Amino acid sequence: MSATQAITLGRAERRETLKSIGLPVVAIVILLVLFSLLSPSFLQLSTFVTILRESAVLLVVAVGMSLVIIQGSIDLSVGATVSLTGLVTASLTKDANVFIAVIAALAVGLLVGFVNGFIFAYGKVPSFLVTLGMSMTVGGLGTWFVDGRPVQVTDAGLRWIAQDQFLLGIPNLVIWALLIWLIFTFVATKMRFGRYTFAIGGAEPVSALAGIPNRRVKLWSLTLVGLCAAIAGILLTSRIGAATPGMGDALTLNSIAAVVMGGTAITGGVGGVQRTVLGVLVITTLTVGLNSMGVMPYMQNIIQGLVVVAAVALTLDRAKLTIIK
């Protein structure tokens, strides 16, 4: 490669990075201005606190999803895993202390993720099909586990996890979410495992020739998503003070949308966990703003769907796609 070609390639990469980061930032600013004009009650401190709280659980799920999408895969079972682990946490706190309940929920999330990853990586079944089937299985297990009934949280220790404030008046829920985001950002940008996920998403056959253990990376990526879903289930249960079957269902598509809106291409190899927070803020700001305007839920779904389609169209790496199916 000549020096001129290298400079041209570098400029193209910088433009792509600027676009993937700049678009969600511009979208957030536009949404804030728009909702401030349309809803007088929107522009106040309590609204921004609500946005932070609403973003927290979604951010935890989305950072795990980022690793999978970066490598060109998908996980459709995160919502069901959030529900199951939340139900496990709330149920066990009635007979055991909160520490045991949390450990059990994390173990369940890890197990679901590991099974997903093993079938995907070593059984060579597409991640879409594996996690879709696991979503139905895990959702059914959660409903069966509690006989379809909600479980109230009575343990003060479990409520403390998300509801209290132990640092500068910031809700614990937000602090946990930011901590998870920082950890996964470090893993994705500074550790070998993170670089491997990018290599697989960029060109899996080439990464295999380079000696990257593709199957092992895929296995642990799906396992980490299960862990993030479990953490989100614990936080969501603590926040609302109850666990219900299906309470995490909306997080599946919302987390995928957040990752894509944050500038990570659904085709893999482009983006980053650090950008996902921007996509989460876009979705949450849109949701909170529409709620402040009193927009009906079905209309919110229409608007959010159009935004997701636009985000995918803008971030899709068409250079990898010779045929669109």
Image (spheres, rainbow, N blue to C red):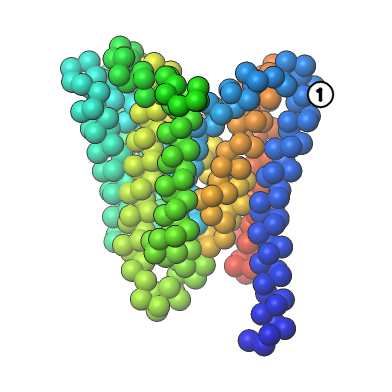
Q: Is residue 314 left or right of residue 93?
A: right
Tell me the quarter of the image containing the N terminus.
Answer: bottom right
Name which quarter of the figure residue 104 lies in.
Answer: top left
In the current view of this chain or complex, which residue is farthest to the bottom?
2
User: Where residue 46 sits: x, y (%)?
Assistant: 62, 18
State whether residue 237 is above or below residue 315. above
Indicate the position of residue 236 as horizontal and vertical percent values: 42, 26
Identity of the residue drawn at 44% across and 21% down: 165
Residue at figure coordinates x 50%, y 22% from the top left: 169
- Residue 304 in percent (x, y) is at 65, 34
Would you name the residue on which mark 1 appears? 37
**Residue 114 in sight:** yes
Q: Residue furthest right?
A: 37
Residue at (24% x, 38% y) in the render: 107
Determine whether 271 is above or below 11 in the image. above
- Quadrant of the drawing holding the C terminus: bottom right
Q: Residue at x 36, y 35 (%)?
A: 231
Residue 47 image offset from top left, x and y in percent:
64, 21
In the image, 126 versus 4, the foreground residue is: 4
Residue that sits furthest to the left in the current view: 95
When the figure is inspected, residue 182 is found, relative to residue 197, above or below; the finding is above
Is residue 134 in view?
A: no
Answer left or right for 17 relative to 86: right
Q: Residues within 10 Å of mark 1 (few under 14, many from 20)?
A: few
Mark 1 residue type: Leu
The residue nearer to you, when weighing 26 against 305, is 26
